[in-house]
Structure formats: structure tokens, C-alpha cells
Image: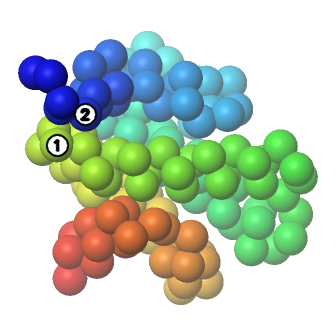
């Protein structure tokens, strides 16, 4: 419909969108673990949650290199974009697979909460309650 915002994650499919948009994700060990099931519901989003968790843990320990820090920044930006999706399935996947994957320990959770944008933080807080 004219005037309606395009939702690339819903239009092209969430796995393809995540693999394209988050640097280093397509080549990550998390994607390698689920490569044969990548199109299965939750496989790509769950892998992204684990990927971002690994990068966030490294960032908290000040061990992330510049490429990992940039990937983490873009990953949080993608989460914010997805949290604003009009597609219920996209938002549910963000909530159930990605945000759940980021709830590892108190230090990481605290860091994650400071990095989420307003839409993804609202989605996270609604889910976490």
C-alpha cells in the first residue's frame, strides 16, 4: 500500500535479513551450528541471540575487537528495527529467541539493557516481566 513503511525482515524473510544485516553473523559458529536448519522457525533468531550474547560477553570483559564491537552495535540497531516491525511473527521471534538468548547473567543483562533502543527495550521489558 502506498505510504506504508516497508518491513524488509518480513518481506525477505527473517533468516535472510539477519544474515545480511548483522556483520559477521553469517560466518559465525552460531550459524554453523544450525546451518542445516537455518530456515526452521527460531533457528536463525536463536543463533543471533547466542551470537550477540557472545559478543556482548567479550565487550563486557573489554576483549571485543573493533569488528566485533561494530557487529554488536549493528546487531542492537537491527534489534531496534525488528522491535518496530508491524509483523507479529517478527516481534515474537525477537522476544522469544533473541532477547531470551541475551538473558545470560546479571552483568550481561545489565549491559544489554543499556544498549537496547526504546522499542526493543520496551519489548524486552514486556517479555521479561
User: In the displayed structure, would residue 70 be above or below residue 53?
Assistant: above
Q: Quadrant of the C terminus?
A: bottom left
Q: In this rendering, would 103 be left or right of 51?
A: left
Q: In this rendering, would 1 be left or right of 14?
A: left
User: Quarter-wise, where is residue 55 in the image?
Assistant: bottom right
The residue at the point 53 percent across, 25 percent down is 19
Residue 83 location (% of width, % of height): 31, 53
Q: Quadrant of the N terminus?
A: top left
Q: Residue furthest front?
A: 3
- Between 122 and 124, the one lying in front of the other is 122
User: In the displayed structure, would residue 40 be above or below residue 58?
Assistant: above
The residue at the point 69 percent across, 66 percent down is 57
The residue at the point 46 percent across, 66 percent down is 117
N-terminal of the two: label 2 or label 1? 2
Looking at the image, is mark 2 or mark 1 nearer the viewer? Answer: 2
Q: CA distance from mark 2 to mark 1?
A: 9 Å
| Mark 1, residue position | 86
User: Quarter-wise, where is residue 30 in the image?
Assistant: top right
| Mark 2, residue position | 5
Cβ–Cβ under 8 Å for marks 2 and 1: yes
Q: In this rendering, would 102 be left or right of 22?
A: left
Residue 28 location (% of width, % of height): 66, 32
Residue 111 location (% of width, % of height): 60, 78
Category of crowding for the residue at label 1, using alpha-carbon neighbours closer than 10 angstroms: few (below 14), some (14–19), many (at least 20): few
For mark 1, give the secondary structure: loop
- Between 9 and 109, the one lying in front of the other is 9
User: In the displayed structure, would residue 85 be above or below residue 129?
Assistant: above
Q: What is the tally of numbered marks visible in this picture?
A: 2
For mark 2, give the secondary structure: loop
Category of crowding for the residue at label 2, using alpha-carbon neighbours closer than 10 angstroms: few (below 14), some (14–19), many (at least 20): few
Amino acid at each position: 500500500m502506498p505510504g506504508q513503511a516497508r518491513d524488509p525482515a518480513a518481506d525477505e524473510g527473517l533468516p535472510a535479513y539477519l544474515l545480511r544485516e548483522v556483520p559477521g553473523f553469517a560466518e559465525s559458529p552460531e550459524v554453523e551450528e544450525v546451518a542445516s536448519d537455518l530456515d526452521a522457525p527460531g533457528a536463525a533468531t536463536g543463533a543471533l541471540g547466542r551470537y550477540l550474547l557472545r559478543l556482548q560477553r567479550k565487550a563486557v570483559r573489554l576483549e571485543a575487537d573493533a569488528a566485533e564491537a561494530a557487529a554488536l552495535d549493528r546487531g542492537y540497531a537491527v534489534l531496534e528495527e525488528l522491535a518496530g516491525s508491524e509483523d507479529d511473527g517478527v516481534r515474537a521471534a525477537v522476544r522469544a529467541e533473541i532477547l531470551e538468548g541475551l538473558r545470560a547473567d546479571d552483568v550481561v543483562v545489565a549491559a544489554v539493557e543499556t544498549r537496547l533502543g526504546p522499542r526493543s527495550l520496551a519489548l524486552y521489558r514486556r517479555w521479561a516481566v
